[in-house]
Amino acid sequence: MDFIPVVKGSYLEGLCADGQSVWVADPVKGGVRRCHADGTICAWLTDRPWIGSLLRGHDDIVLVSGESIIWLDGRTGASGLVADSVNGKPLPGVNEMIADRRGAIYFGSSDLAAIARLERAAPASLYRLDPDGRVTELVGGLRFANGLAISPDGKRLYHNETFVGTSAYDIRPDGSLGAAVRLLDKVDCDGLAVDTDGTLWIAGFETHAILRMRPDGTLIDPVPIPGGGATNVRFGGPDLRDLYVTTVAQGAAMRLAAGMGPEAEDSVLYRGRSDVAGLAVPRAALPAA
């Protein structure tokens, strides 16, 4: 697969795409950029750090993670709070997010205060944010919550737990999760996407390719990528065959964890063309006012 660079940044991460544009975040430098098909780029929330995920809502609304979950209007740059607490307690931070067919949002927590102090983060959890605004903790005791995806039939949640690997959870009718089933051991697993065949596309921040895995855990041919590793992967374009990958230099993630920020803008968002279409990610429903 041939890849074309779209935009560069310090450490590119969270991705979402539609038929005409792709959104990308830079959690180190801060902010969100929307890259249009005609080459124009709009920058929003330039003072907001630690954005690990972007998720489309209705119209031009995008949900943005970080210290909390906020909404962003892609036309005007206006923004507002969606969720910052669970059962009256502040969330420690939010990393990856994914929506189900009801518009409910599954997301993982992130101990941003410890990360900023260069300390080992406290255990993470997976949560569900329902359209009525209720936040429910689903799974606790995770090492580092990262990429999320849902199977084509909507019955399984896939999760990349960085430093551990990729697991699957059955989604019960009430939105709760069954027991984790480990599919892959992979210490550098990061972002995650699913195609229409149900194949998982797994990014690794120290891996020179996107791994591809069947739902039963069988690995198939990987997709080589430029750069030292990949932090996220998403499908977009009118036919959902545009493959977007955010890449970082070899060792960039571990240097960042040690407090050594990127010295150059050598993180790149690439676009390629996939033989198989990606699975359309449902749009998130904003909690009722």
Image: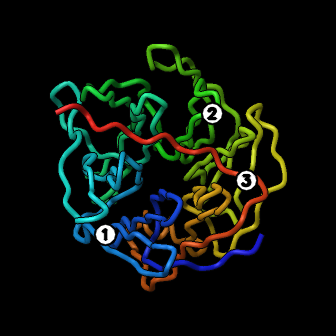
Query: On screen, 151 above or below 137?
Result: below
Q: Indicate the amino acid at tag 1.
A: Gly
215, 71: nearer the viewer: 71
Residue at numbered disc 1: 30
Q: Relative to residue 183, is residue 118 drawn left or right? A: left
Q: Residue at x 52, y 15 (%)?
A: 172
Q: Residue at x 25, y 66 (%)?
A: 45
Q: Would residue 125 be seen by someone viewing this image from the given angle? A: no
Residue at numbered disc 3: 211
Q: Quadrant of the C terminus?
A: top left
User: Who comes first in sequence, dot 1 or dot 3?
Assistant: 1
The local secondary structure at tag 2 comes to loop
Residue at numbered disc 2: 151
189, 210: nearer the viewer: 210
Q: Indicate the amino acid at tag 3.
A: Leu
Q: Position of residue 264 (x, y in %)?
A: 45, 85
Q: Indicate the amino acid at tag 2.
A: Ser
User: Who comes first in sequence, dot 1 or dot 2?
Assistant: 1
